[in-house]
Amino acid sequence: MTAGYNTISMGTGRKEFNPKKERPGLDHYIKDAGQGVLKQIGGADKIDESVIGNFMSARFNKQAHLGGFAGAIDPKLEFKPSLSVEGACGSGGLSLITGIRSVLAETADTVLSIGVEVQNTVKAIYGADILAGAGWFDKRKHGHAYFFPGQFSDRAGVYYEKYGHEYARNGMRRWFVNAIENARLDPTAQEYHNSTPDLAVLYDKMTPNGKAFVDHLNVLDCSKVSDGASGIVVASEEGLQRMGIDKKDAVEVAGWAQLTRNITNDPPDPVELTTIKAAAAKAMEMAGITMDQVGTVETHDCFSIAGILAVEALGLAAPGKGAEYVAEGNTARNGKMPMNTTGGLIGWGHPTGGTGVHQAVTIWQQLTGKAGDAQITLSDDRPYGLTINMGGDDVTVVAIVYKRA
Amino acid sequence: MNYDEKLQHVSVLGAAGKMGSGILLLTAVEMADLSLKPENKGKAFVLNAIDLSDQALAGVVAYLRAQVVKIAEKKAVLLRQFYADRNDLIENYDIIEQYVNDVLALVRPTTAMEVAYKSTLIFEAVSENKDLKVKIFKQIDQNNPNKPWYFTNTSSVPIHMIEGEAGLDGRVLGFHFYNPPAVQRLVELIVTEKTLPEVNQFALDYAKALGKVVVPSNDFAGFIGNGHFMRDALYGIKLAEELAKDHPFAEAVYMVNKVSQDFLVRPMGIFQLIDYVGIDVVQFIMKVMNPFLDDEDLHSDLLDKMMEMGVKGGQMSSGAQKDGFLKYEKGAVVAVFDTDQNEYSDVVNFASACEAALGALPNSFKPWKAAVRIKDKDSHFGPYFNDMKQMDSLGAQLALGYGKNSDAIGRKLLTDKVARSEQDVNTVMLTGFFHAFGPINNYFA
Ligand SMILES: NC(=O)c1ccc[n+]([C@@H]2O[C@H](COP(=O)([O-])OP(=O)(O)OC[C@H]3O[C@@H](n4cnc5c(N)ncnc54)[C@H](O)[C@@H]3O)[C@@H](O)[C@H]2O)c1
């Protein structure tokens, strides 16, 4: 993969965001991300096909059929294959996977992969309805007003019960603090302008309140509501040559997995991200590596508790030990395993259908030294990066292992 | 008749007015919530919105809808429980829409007073005119077989006078909301010697359900809030007139406004507050209160003069501030009315000179926004005003005199037996007027 590009993640937190003013729509973000990629590869004629990952534009923007927007990015993408894919918040990951499959099937050498979502078109309370589409609609009636926060609040509740409330909150607080501190280093991040002096104090002030929101999470435990898009090119070696891109400016896809769980069932274990666990193991097996060789991870922290549970699913900590692992600073940018180094979904933002691609862009930046102020140092014995992109409550999962090419 | 039954048939008089529309909104939401309780299923709840013009009532319905949508969006978590057995309502969107419809369905806008003849509870917020209020109450009471209870929103008319003249024996009390009722948390509750205990109890229950802070006030013209505000305003006006002997009038007004806002750490200066309430309203309330006061004259020639010149202040229907003593642009003060010139004088021309004349604020100054949140008031304001006492600037002197007078007004409300405790006076000024510290304190002694 190469030539990654992120638009700004727009929404609350950005100084320029004003919910009362009219804002750019879906087409703006698709074009911005697509053109940002094309500029780096010498133009659209180098691209064989396009894939656009998106979750719910049909409701957020009353717009379906996003494959049709490729030609709006550049006329030279018209009359070439272009399609859209959907797997809730895992849509971006599916866009990458679709590109990978096409390259492996040798139906394309270069695929423009985009992920996009424009969510600030409705108030949060109605956005919750739309996002609830990532779960089974039969369960909506008895779900929470804020459906997904409700699902993960329930998971958090069980985690508190099992391992201790204070103990868990310590880990979740640190997860939040890391997210904001990392976001402050990336100018495209939604929390880039965040200047709260003491984040931990702020976090502790906001006691979860089930009457106004959910029982076990406060809003700082949640990912952002975002408008944004990301793009990257998935290419074969021939494709790289055609674009004239040096290998040192690309990352190799060393392994990947895309698994889904039955959406009509509840998760088998509330304190385990079972699908993530299986997908990560499969992708690493394909790459022929273990977590010891991974230098950085981008994981799907739609909620801080999902970050903690991912740490456990990846085997970085034993079940129940994830909160401690995070609280001790192991996932901070200077820790043992830097995670979500540009802020993740809580700090950088979560344009739902765009997130999977954003994760790939961050790993590409980190492995090729293009992360700017957010750059971390990776040691040579751990040259791999890993992304975990999740749709719904651990239903659709995309795991990808990357390596310096 | 229990609480829920009492709220089954209600009328709001003056429902299209500033206060009436807010009272209508709060009552409609409370009634809808009652109607959604399982035990009230199938019972009819009726809320009459009575005013003089159909056009104004149409505006109120639009206002209600917009406000109820906002309220519903905020309490979606609770609403999902209300409608848990409605399988056709699944998404927040469905539930919020249903709730808005349910609230609006019980509101009956009308210009026909006769509908109140069936009500058991009547909120009154018609124009501030005792004879009008008495006339309406009499008419309803003579035609209504239910012996309804009357909650009047009057700001200045003693309740026992309304009670006596309308013949309501014990069934009326003052339920004095602050403007705007939907936002302001304070309610002054005024009972007469005759008010029945069950009427009082219901008022307390209703206020609690609305999340209001209740302060009892004795039945004396102006009650606590206006009792303080009117005298405080008169002091500010006299101070400005005094200063105007040495300074142009507009500058005097500017300085007094600044002293009462910044030096005394209030959300707005006294002239801005007069404009906010409306010069006409302030003049009128003073006029209503004055006959009841034997040891003072609550009257200002300056207010009369402003009214004659057609400068009234108050708010536009959009909620934006109209020009009064001060002229506003996007909420900021840009000019001050000069009664000699009969025109506004731009602040930029004299602001810095006035500020220099007043002198600096004490170093321990904290702006209102921060100071209003301080829990232990004495720990901040004690030292702050002590610092001020060490300064001999004009601003410090004026502020200390102003604070001392405000304290004296507060204590007088106690000796006049308008308020029952120091705390009640302070609660009214803290909650209803958003002062950062109560008027009764020891800072100015
Ligand atoms: N505005 C305030 O800050 C404030 C604060 C507290 C209390 N109050 C009191 O509330 C009451 C209403 O004040 P407001 O500011 O809302 O005034 P307003 O002028 O905005 O509203 C009064 C409403 O009463 C209606 N009305 C007049 N005569 C009527 C009649 N015979 N039948 C039905 N409706 C009639 C008018 O059409 C108008 O809509 C007054 O008693 C006032 O003292 C006002």
Image: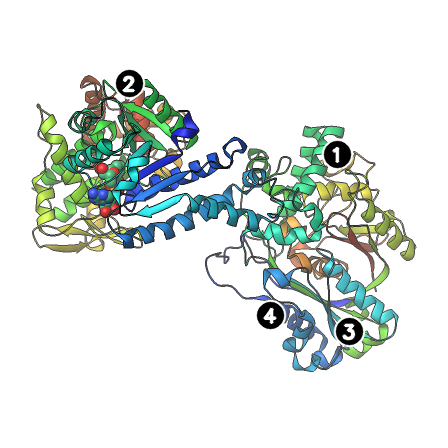
Which mark is drawn over residue B265? none
Residue carrying label 1: A324
Q: In this view, does A285 lie to the left or right of A122?
A: right
Q: How far apart are marks 1 and 3 (CA)?
A: 42 Å
Q: In this view, does A110 lie above or below A295?
A: below
How far is disc 4 from disc 1 in space, using C-alphas? 43 Å
Say what secondary structure mark 1 lies in: helix
Which mark is nearer the camera, 2 or 1? 2
First reached walking from the N terminus: tag 4 or tag 1:
4
**Image x and y of residue A230, in percent:** 67, 64
Q: Quote the CA–CA distance across marks 2 and 1.
A: 54 Å
Q: Using the rendered image of the protein, determine whether residue A365 is visible from the camera's viewpoint.
A: no
According to the picture, the residue beneath numbered tag 4 turns out to be A27
Q: Earlier in the sequence, mark 1 or mark 3?
A: 3
Q: How far apart are marks 3 and 4 (CA)?
A: 28 Å
Q: Mark 3 points at which residue?
A: A245
Nearer the observer, A378 or A83: A83
Image quarter in which the C terminus of chain A is found: bottom right
Count neighbours of disc 2 (C-alpha within 10 A) and say few if under 14, some if 14 to 19, many if 20 or more.
some
Residue B403 higher or lower than B79, as above or below: above
Picture coordinates of residue A52, whole percent (x, y): 71, 67
Q: Which of A145 and B8 is in front in this view?
A: B8
* Secondary structure under the numbered disc 4 in the rendered image: helix
- Mark 3: secondary structure: loop
Residue B396 in picture, x, y percent from top left = 22, 33
Q: Which chain carries label 4?
A: A
Q: Image point 23% across, 55% down: which residue?
A: B348
Q: Which amino acid does label 4 sit on?
A: Asp
Q: In which quarter of the image is residue B49?
A: top left
Which residue is disc 2 drawn over? B421
